[in-house]
Image (tube, rainbow, N blue to C red):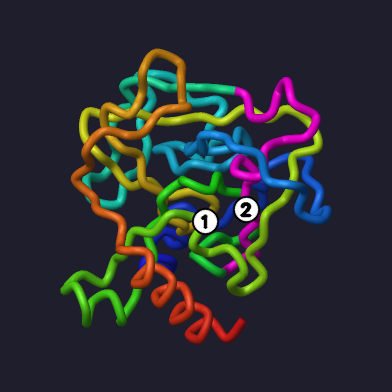
């Protein structure tokens, strides 16, 4: 399994992919363009050690799922809810309990951040055991839930020469689309990707299957 391999190479990490959050009741929903990317304290596998994504710079190398260590070409950054005390619900990150998608500890993900899940169901239906789903499809499964930011947070996007999938917080896998950045702006839609998310119904079925497998 992926988790066994990455743990053998890098060992564990005890960092948390987030900072200050609150699990308050859902507010009235406000329209907002969703943000994808990695919250600043998310730990990323590099040749020397696990590093917070906030410390990565162009030229640094990161462990990818398909292509070994790859050079970061650029880093995009934006602030989440920096100017709005009532953060739009569409931008609330999701808290993923330890172990659910290969993360060794709690992981906070942006709703439109695509993650890779290993799934027998996906292999049977699509011929590939590694399924890509938006993090928002995990909402409500195995304790995954939205959390309101209680202070401004920075969100980072790593851009490589081509689409890559990188390891975070253990053996969790997240997608970094190529050419997704427009300057420093993450409030954009990624360009056409070499990786394709599952249709929504299939994505939810894969998440439910994972819940059954993990016994949560």
Instruction: Out of 187 and 29, give the one closest to the viewer.
Output: 29
Q: Is residue 157 above or below residue 22?
A: above
- Local crowd size for mark 2, using a 10 Å CA cut-off: few (<14), some (14–19), many (≥20): many
Please say whether residue 71 is visible from this viewpoint.
Answer: yes
User: Marks 2 and 1: which is nearer the front?
Assistant: 1
Instruction: Out of 25 and 106, give the one closest to the viewer.
Output: 25
Q: Position of residue 214 (x, y in %)?
A: 53, 81
Q: Is residue 139 above or below residue 210?
A: above
Could you tell whether 73 is left or right of 82 in the image? left
Residue corresponding to mark 1: 136
Q: Give the quarter of the image for residue 12.
A: bottom right
Locate the N terminus and report the quarter of the image it occupies.
Answer: bottom left
Q: Residue at x 36, y 46 (%)?
A: 175
Q: Are marks 2 and 1 in contact (CB under 8 Å)?
A: yes
Residue corresponding to mark 2: 94
Q: Position of residue 213 (x, y in %)?
A: 48, 85
Q: What range of the chain is rendered magenta?
A: 79-99
Residue extending farthest to the top is 183
Q: Position of residue 103 (x, y in %)?
A: 55, 60
Q: Give the quarter of the image for residue 162.
A: top left
> Helix, strand, or loop for circle 2?
strand
Is residue 86 rendered magenta in the image?
yes
> Helix, strand, or loop for circle 1?
helix
């Amino acid at each position: 399994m992926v988790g066994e391999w990455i743990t053998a190479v890098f060992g564990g990490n005890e960092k948390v992919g987030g900072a200050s959050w609150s699990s308050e009741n859902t507010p009235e929903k406000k329209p907002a363009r969703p943000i994808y990317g990695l919250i600043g304290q998310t730990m990323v596998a590099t040749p020397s050690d696990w590093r917070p994504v906030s410390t990565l710079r162009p030229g640094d190398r990161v462990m990818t799922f398909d292509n070994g260590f790859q050079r970061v070409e650029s880093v995009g950054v934006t602030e989440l809810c920096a100017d709005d005390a009532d953060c739009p619900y569409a931008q609330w990150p999701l808290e993923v309990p330890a172990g659910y998608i290969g993360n060794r500890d709690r992981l906070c993900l942006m709703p439109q951040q695509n993650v890779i899940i290993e799934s027998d169901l996906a292999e049977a239906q699509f011929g590939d055991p590694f399924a890509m789903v938006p993090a928002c499809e995990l909402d409500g499964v195995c304790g995954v839930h939205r959390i309101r930011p209680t202070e401004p947070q920075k969100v980072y996007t790593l851009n490589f020469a081509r689409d890559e999938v990188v390891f975070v917080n253990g053996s969790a896998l997240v997608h970094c689309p190529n050419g997704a950045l427009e300057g420093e702006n993450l409030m954009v839609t990624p360009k056409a990707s070499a990786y394709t998310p599952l249709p929504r119904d299939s994505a939810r079925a894969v998440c439910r299957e994972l819940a059954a497998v993990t016994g949560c």
